[in-house]
Image (cartoon, grey):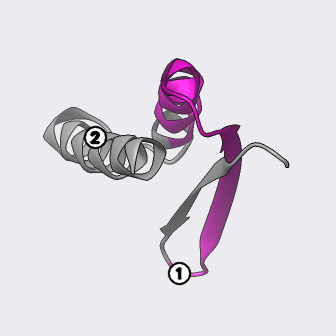
Amino acid sequence: MKPARAVISLRRGSPLSLVQFEYSSTLASHEQMFDDLNATLSDWGIEGRQAELIRLCVSEVYTNAVVH
């Protein structure tokens, strides 16, 4: 049986920008997910409070997907 995978997709703007990352469904992959998320937010010029809120939401969704 293949290990479960967690997929994070981020979409932004018009025209639509899309990035998608895939990770093993383990809490150990959480750090890599944050590295990818932070790089994407930086590339898109998203910072400050808006970036913090996005990180919080994505972290919650990611953790729930891995745990449940």
Q: Earlier in the sequence, mark 1 or mark 2?
A: 1
| Residue at horizontal 59 percent and vertical 32 percent from the top | 36
Residue that extends furthest to the front in the rendered view of this protein: 1
**Residue 32: percent from left, percent from top:** 59, 23
Q: Nearer the viewer, residue 63 or 55?
A: 63
Residue 10 is left or right of residue 19, and the answer is: left
SS type, badge 1: loop
Q: Nearer the viewer, residue 49 or 64?
A: 64
- Residue 20 percent location from the top left of the image: 68, 56
- Residue 37 position in % (x across, y down): 50, 37
Q: Secondary structure at mark 2?
A: helix
Residue 19 vs residue 68: left or right?
A: right
- The residue at which mark 2 appears reads as 51
Query: What residue occupies the far right of the structure in this picture?
Result: 1
**Of tags 1 and 2, which is closer to the observer?**
2
The magenta stretch is 14-40
Q: Residues within 10 Å of mark 1 (few under 14, many from 20)?
A: few
| Residue 11 against residue 60 in the figure, above or below | below
3 and 36: which is toward the camera: 3
Q: Amino acid at mark 2?
A: Ala
Q: Is residue 27 magenta?
A: yes
Residue 63: give x, y in percent of width and height. 37, 40
* Residue under pointer 1: 14
Q: Is residue 18 visible?
A: yes
Question: Does the magenta run of residues contain 38?
Answer: yes
